[in-house]
Image (tube, grey):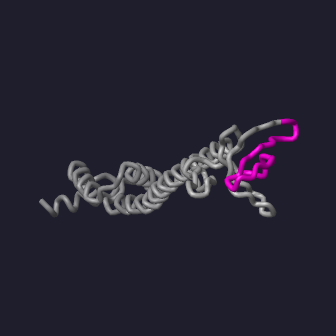
Amino acid sequence: MFVAELVGAFPSGKPTDPEVYVKALIAEVAAVDPIYVEIETAVRAVRRKKTFLPAIAEVLAEIRNAESIWGARTDAILEFGDDVDRMTRRVSELREALDKRERERHERSNFAVGDRVRHMRFSANLGTGTVEHVEEDCLGVALSVRFDGGTTKVVTGKEVQKLLPGEKGYAVEQCVQCNNVTG
């Protein structure tokens, strides 16, 4: 039986025994376990290159060739998919950071009475204080700020940074011994 299958598996034009040839071909292809696109690529190559029914070895050679082509393509596609996932996550992270920064910038740029601020000019750093009065005009924002050291000054919105909850200097503490405010 084995010899008959082997002889039938090597046709020269038409298979001697089509049933044996088909069974052997199916068994050999199944043993290689190619994916659909590899089988399709191999069958197309056989149809385009051969003028007679090929031997099973020729079909298997075309499947191996298709596996090497599609293996590299599949790896590239999977790697690209991983890259897209990483980039999508990174873009989301950056958008969130940008949104947070924009919200913070907006929060810091709108001053109101009672806001805590930090003086930002190095030449006359007055520390932290509380906004007592806000006046806006065409030139910008002028703030009357009572600084924690007891000094009250009028400064521009560009000279101070609005403090947000949790930042150093945001909370005002009353010094009981000296009756001064500290930040």
Residue farthest to the right, as pictured: 138
Q: Residue at x 87, y 36 (%)?
A: 138
Q: Residue at x 34, y 60 (%)?
A: 60
Q: Which of 168 and 28 is in front in this view?
A: 168
Q: Quadrant of residue 115?
A: top right
In percent of width and height, residue 141 lies at 80, 41
In percent of width and height, residue 72 lies at 46, 61
Q: Which residue is drawn at 54% across and 47% down?
A: 92
Q: Which of 97 and 111 is in front in this view?
A: 111
Does the segment drawn in magenta span residue 49? no
Q: Which of 15 and 2 is in front in this view?
A: 2
Residue 27 visible? The answer is yes
In percent of width and height, residue 86 lies at 50, 54
Q: Is residue 48 left or right of residue 28?
A: right
Quadrant housing the C terminus: bottom right
Q: Residue at x 71, y 43 (%)?
A: 131
Identify the main secondary structure in magenta: strand
Q: In this view, does 28 lie above or below 44?
A: below
Does the segment drawn in magenta span residue 157? yes
Q: Nearer the viewer, residue 102 or 127?
A: 127
Q: Is residue 111 left or right of residue 45?
A: right
In percent of width and height, residue 19 lies at 21, 48
Quadrant housing the N terminus: bottom left
Q: Quadrant of residue 112?
A: top right
Count all numbered tags in the image, as a single digit. 0
* Magenta-tinted stretch: 137-160
Residue 49 visible? The answer is no
